[in-house]
Image (cartoon, helix red, strand yellow):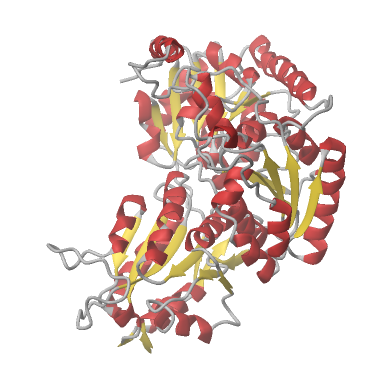
Amino acid sequence: MRLTTAQALVRWLLVQRAELVDGREGPLFPGVFAIFGHGNVLGLGTALEEVRAELPVWRGHNEQGMALAAVGVAKAAHRRQVGVATSSIGPGALNMVTAAGVAHANRLPLLLLPGDTFVGRAPDPVLQQVEHFGDPTTTVNDAFRAVSRYFDRITRPEQLTATLPQVARVLTDAADCGPVVLALPQDVQAEAYDFPDALFATVVHRPVRTRPDRRALDTAAAAVRAARKPLLVLGGGVRYSGAAGRALRFAEQHGLPVVETTAGRTLVPHDHPLHAGPLGITGSTSANVLAGEADVVLAVGTRLQDFTTASWTVFPPDVRLVSVNAARFDAVKHGALSVVADADEALRELTDLLGTWQADRSWSARAREERERWDAHISGLRVFEGGLPTYAQVVGVVNEASGPEDYVLTAAGGLPGELIGGWRAVGESTMDVEYGFSCMGYELAGAWGAAIARPGGVVTTLLGDGSYLMLNSELFSAAFAGHGFVAVVCDNDGYAVIHRLQTGQGGVGFNNLYGDCLTSHDRPPRTDFAAHAASMGCAVFPADGLAEFAEAYRKAREVARSEHRPAVVVVRTHPSSWTDAGAWWEVGVPEVSHRAEIATAHAEVRAGKQRQVRYL
């Protein structure tokens, strides 16, 4: 079949199918986000136009934003579908590097197709080309190598026959999942080749269920059976395996208290008697109290990031860690007793090995006891007593209005702590807190992607004024394309959570809140978020106070569903009221400073490091 390189790539995208979460079969690549330039408009752009009735192409307005939307698709689809983004060479390509970092840190599939300079080099240097004096093969796309799980530069059309199976492997493999970058020189995109018909045969990608090694599982079972206070930690790998039900049955059969990581949030019904809450710095005191007493921790599908482990101070020094993970890289961390396997398969077989064994009933009962104390604390924080609403109160309103088909997300600033710690699950796997890379700007772009992947319920994203200003162009992209979601913009006068970190470690407020920033104005300008969002084609609902916010949010949900465009609720919020789980976080406090407060904070860091668990 004689096709250009670009035509062959697009035809291959069309025949890749996937088994979706509900068991139906659907496209592995549901659509392409594109900004065309001279490096991709003729080759790849022409190929996409030829199949526009079969493969949706959504126009982006910032390359980083549209690629983050592609990440949002993958997360909302539980890694069963993959977003694709293409840009021209030079600045367009480099703008997508951040999105690749988000996908890499969060183990999410993403296919990036940046244009590249001419392989033939006859017209060099071309527009937007960065020349390396000692290596003419280097282009800006080499910047992707640090944030790619798989990288290739297609310099001959026939290379697709070798690389495309590897592309599919990485995007669908539970252990290696991450961003794939295919750099496409513009002359090669347009070059033709006689491709074999077999390359375009339909392939249905189904989850590969890796079974655990029996000896490793026997050892893990023995460790759990010997535990006096075992704790089950559920991470994102449980979500992507579709193993939430299995994990809950496992906990019930053996009486294990259950806690969730950031990526594992909403796996467990909030009021389940064995649910102790979210773990870590942005988690709950209930989960952290149990973690502090646990002697064996069974961690399933988690890479145990510092916010989950409170910089490795949340567990006792002598804790025994048993790690179940599809990726050996994650399973062996911190000297864990490692079980390399799919979460669903591992829990099924471990249940059989444990038989009728159960943890002590008094320990099992602690989960509900501690969580109810945390619930009472959160309920108290949600009570409005006048003044500016707090983040906790805003989250409470959204939580109470949400149903099992709805989906909520955030990424950076203070809202991850409020959403992780304060949200009460109303549906399984219905939260996306991008806290692997914590990318400001993901909130709006990711919501666009989530709205594409989840058309049934209402997608709500919560973000601060700083994140809104960081990246808001995809509001217009979503409005133009006809994808509705609700964006709750909490205006608290700047980068408030970093101000909290700065002043909480002995520093003075500087360059974070607007009042501490350099300006030549006596009365500096303020952003009119409502007017700006309206100019981007969004429905807008400004709100003053919590009661008005609740009504504005209700109306926004209706508009997002009925008018198929983003509905933005803008509310002024308190700049220094936070939900705190009482856990420690290691940060780099200066050892030498002119401020006594910083010296005191540094001493506290040294004391905290003495509590860190050291396995190796």
Quick check: 38 left or right of 381? Answer: left
At 52% across and 61% down in the image, what residue appears?
82
Which quadrant holds the C terminus? top left
Which quadrant holds the N terminus? bottom left
Residue 471 sits above or below residue 135 on the image: above
Residue 161 or residue 99, whichever sits in front: 99
Residue 164 or residue 360, whichever sits in front: 164
At 55% across and 46% down in the image, what residue appears?
241
Give x and y (percent) for residue 66.
53, 62
Give x and y (percent) for residue 573.
72, 35
Residue 184 sits above or below residue 309 on the image: below
- The answer to whether residue 128 is seen in the rendering is yes
Residue 9 sits above or below residue 72 on the image: below
At 68% across and 25% down in the image, what residue appears?
577
Residue 271 sits above or below residue 31 on the image: above
Residue 158 or residue 104, whichever sits in front: 104
Extreme bottom residue here?
A: 2
